[in-house]
Image (cartoon, helix red, strand yellow):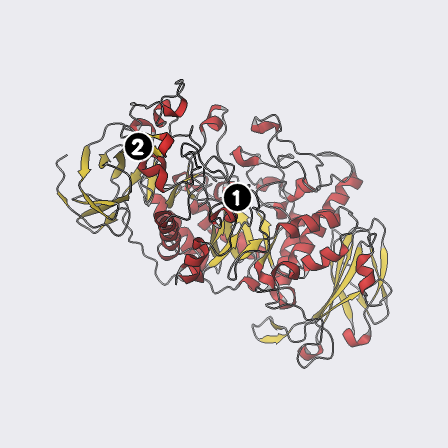
Amino acid sequence: MNAKTLPGKPFPLGPTYDGEGVNFTLYSENATGVDLCLFDDENSGKESARIRLTEKTDFIWHIYVKDIKPGQLYGYRVSGPYEPQNGHRFNPNKLLIDPYAKAIAGSIKWDDALFGYKVGNDEADLGFSDTDSAPFIPKSVVIDPEFEWEDDKSPSLQYYNTVIYEAHVKGFTMLNPAIPENIRGTYAAIAHPVTITYLKELGITAIELMPVHSFISDRSLKEKGLSNYWGYNTIGFFAPDARYTSGAVRGEQVTEFKSMVKELHKAGIQVILDVVYNHTAEGNQMGPTLSFKGIDNASYYRLTDDKRYYNDYTGTGNTLNANLPNVLRLMMDSLRYWVTEMHVDGFRFDLAATLARELHEVNQLSAFFEIIHQDPVISQVKLIAEPWDVGEGGYQVGKFPAGWAEWNGKYRDCIRDYWNGAENTIAEFADRITGSADLYQDYRRPTASINFITAHDGFTLNDLVSYNEKHNDANGEDNNDGEGHNRSWNCGAEGPTEDEGIKALRSRQKRNFLATLFLSQGVPMLVSGDETGRTQGGNNNAYCQDNEISWLNWEAADHELLAFTSKLIHLRNTHSVFSRKNWFKGVPAKDSKIEDIAWFLPDGAQMEESHWKEGFAKSVAMYLSGDGIESVDSDGSPVKDDNFYLIFNAHEEGLDYKIPPERYGGSWVVVIDTSRAEGPEEKQYQQADNIHVEGRSVVLIQCKNEKNG
């Protein structure tokens, strides 16, 4: 190929198609030479052209190649010193993925050639490999960014009216018989009317997709016949993974992803991406050379004092160095791209504490957060932290800056303990269901708390009430992987059982967890399949199970549980008293004579300070005032919300609770009773009546606000 070239420009970074050709750029501070390699076939190891980049501006190598069109495959070869002991791992024999590639074609074919050193050599990673890796590595793809977005815009949803549904693109849709078979497991399946109707009927307002950035399945997993199903092993921070596209055209995953976002937006559903900027798929010093490691290892990763090795705060072998300007720019450019070009509505940051580390300590005022806060694009979308990593001092729940929400691990742990009958939990339980003021009240609102009982990592809700121990043998690690302390309870038998009593108790416990989740202040997150009773057979670390263990089995769905979950979510979406914007004050709201919240004992007396310290206490009643809370009537008109009385009883035995005094409301009706699978008994209660609350159950009663008629 006789390529016509011009010097090109250093910005924007990555490939830019202008209708006549493509401007290519690559950042490398320590390289001595960069070659752009063009390919006609993604499976080929033979390039059709190799073009030397001779222009360099502020460590950015650049060139413009005329007549290049969208769909062109390419990669880079970067020359420089191979000195691992000094942090340099350049090897021009290794074809490298462009960090700014907008699409990546093909899948990795594991071979020793993918490693910068000679595998099996006595010198380990110090031995230089001269084998060409091009036949085995995916190729970067030039795309045409044009797309007909029409009048697409993000649904106007604040945190307080958000219900998050965590889902895996493939696992959520792969077995759905109502979706055309040829698109199951893809972005197109998420965009299908069947999926969107399901989410709408369930009451979901935001779908949080597990990683869709292009990722690599580890060699060790492939050799076991497994794969990196979850996708927390990123290699392309701008490229939607091609595994989830239904088409075969190069770069089609980009347009299919955009179409998915557009359809979800039309339905009023936001799209949040689970993103992994803390590490890459290249592993430690013994890992492969796929991209960053060969482009400029020392300019991308956190290295130890002995620069041969990596600081590993992630448990994956390496950590991207968010303190370096070029790495920060990569992260910000990526985030901004997904907002402006792909129209996503927010991000959940995996192991976000890693990004907050300056040198070794976690610092919430690190450069990463400072840059995000001043960015006019990124600062305006939903930002959710997984507020921990595996390094020392990495557990940072409640410590992220204003503007951030957090996965509240303390909420998860407390709610599990409470419903499993642990003592000394009642005071913390009250904190957690009212928004975790102890964690967030200083400078944030209740919506800083992303409440969850389960997540992709750990037991499903069904397994949480069915197993005491993890059962991860299918992962090939002798059941040594996964969390050992799950705060689970099998209700009397390990795994599946025919005992009707145990089955009934498990169903009740699932309803208890769900009722607690959706009636708590904060932002609820439901894991895909928990509403239908999905099981992983006790596997609490199914990261490598791209099969029926992880996929949602629609044929086995528990429709009774699904209906209950939908009722809860719609109750929450209808009544703003369960999703307050601000903190409870414990005093009357404006134009009201009663407190916005009050706590009661079974005999109707209000709780005093001493009652919260009674370790044996496992029941509590919470009054929620609708006065001062604006809700929406069935016709969409604003009204004052209703009053609610919410009773939690984690005792084995039932209790009688007295209805609140007259000043808290007149006639009450039960709307939720988790002890009854068929739904609550149709009965009204008046002041001083007793309502029986069965053991291990939640009862919610409602009093229509007189101001609503």
Task: Please identify the residue farthest to the bottom as the structure is shown.
Answer: 591
Nearer to us: label 2 or label 1: 2
- Kindly report the distance in space between the C-alpha atoms of the residues bearing marks 2 and 1: 41 Å
Q: Amino acid at mark 2?
A: Phe
Given residues 373 and 74, the one toward you in this image is 373
Residue at the spot x=86%, y=68% of the render? Answer: 689
Q: Quadrant of residue 612?
A: bottom right
Counting residues from the start of the chain, the first of labels 2 and 1 encountered is 2
Identity of the residue drawn at 69% across and 55% down: 516
Q: Secondary structure at mark 1?
A: helix
Q: Which residue is mark 1?
A: 172
Q: Identify residue for label 2.
A: 90
Left or right, 335 with reference to 624: left
Residue type (three-letter) at the residue carrying disc 1: Phe
Residue 658 screen position, x and y as percent: 85, 65
Q: Nearer the viewer, residue 551 or 391?
A: 391
- Residue 95: image quadrant is top left
